[in-house]
Amino acid sequence: DDTLIPIVQWLKDLGMDDSQVAKAITKFPQLLTCSLENTLQPIVRWLTDLGMHDSQVLKTIAEFPHLLGYSLEDKLKPTAQWLNDRGMNDMQVANAVVRSPQLLRCRLEGNRAPSVQWLKDLGMDDSQVAKAITKFPQLLTCSLENTLQPIVRWLTDLGMHDSQVLKTIAEFPHLLGYSLEDKLKPTAQWLN
């Protein structure tokens, strides 16, 4: 179909090879129905304006082509603004999205707001929260009740003081993404 060729060519012009184009279309077939001028190009322009380099834009789209189906005005910009309002600058938002493009699919007040407030309640300031999210954006998609809180409780049960727990999370937020039962407890047991 002649309407599909410009989108496929545009993806190639972004730097995707045939295999990446095929994977992107397989992951998100609706991509072929998106408007090049009104949807796809504005989103890529916005990602670049946010601070992404061309290679980062390519990586993000190749990993999570669904991003190209989101509303720029109703989803992407408000999500970036929400992160800006929590102390992240545009470059930190861009880096977080490159690390975890799925971050942009989360509901604004779903997992995110309670997780940010919880980090602040632990004693993190805005810059520490911003750095933690930049290093490990998946933090905002983790369940507060089922993942984040149990790990902190476990660290405390190990004998860590609140200040040590805070420092550990601030420096290595990835810890909060590990399985407590499958990774952290067995590792701690092995070390003992």
Image (cartoon, rainbow, N blue to C red):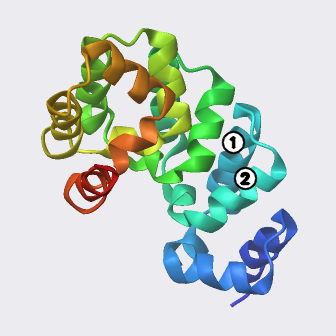
Camera-nearest residue between 113 and 1: 113
| Residue 104 picture location, percent across and down | 46, 45
Position of residue 53 relative to residue 41, above or below, is: above
Against 4, residue 70 (above or below) is: above
Q: Position of residue 92 (x, y in %)?
A: 62, 29
Asked if marks 2 and 1 touch (Cβ < 8 Å), the reply is yes
- The answer to which of 6 and 59 lies nearer the viewer is 59
Write the residue at 44% across / 43% down: 174
Circle nearer the N terminus (2, 1): 1
On the picture, is 188 further left or further right than 31? left
Splitting the image into 4 quarters, where does residue 2 fall? bottom right
Q: Residues within 10 Å of mark 2 (few under 14, many from 20)?
A: many
Residue beneath label 2, please?
57
Task: Tell me the amino acid under the disc marked 1.
Answer: Leu
Residue at (29, 51) in percent of width and height: 184
Local crowd size for mark 1, using a 10 Å CA cut-off: few (<14), some (14–19), many (≥20): many
Side of 159 relative to 177 (left or right): left
Is 91 located above or below residue 28 in the figure?
above
Disc 2 marks a residue whose amino acid type is: Val
Residue pictured at 72% horizontal, 86% vertical: 19
Q: Residue reaching furthest bottom? A: 1
Q: How many marks?
A: 2
Label 2: element kind: helix
Q: Secondary structure at mark 1?
A: helix
The answer to whether one can see residue 4 in this image is: no
Judge from the rendering whether residue 22 lies leftward or rightward of residue 149; answer left or right: right
Residue 47's tag is 1
Above or below, comparing residue 123 to residue 30 in the picture: above
The alpha-carbon separation of the residues under discs 2 and 1 comes to 7 Å
Residue 50 pos. (x, y %): 70, 33
Residue 51 found in image quarter:
top right
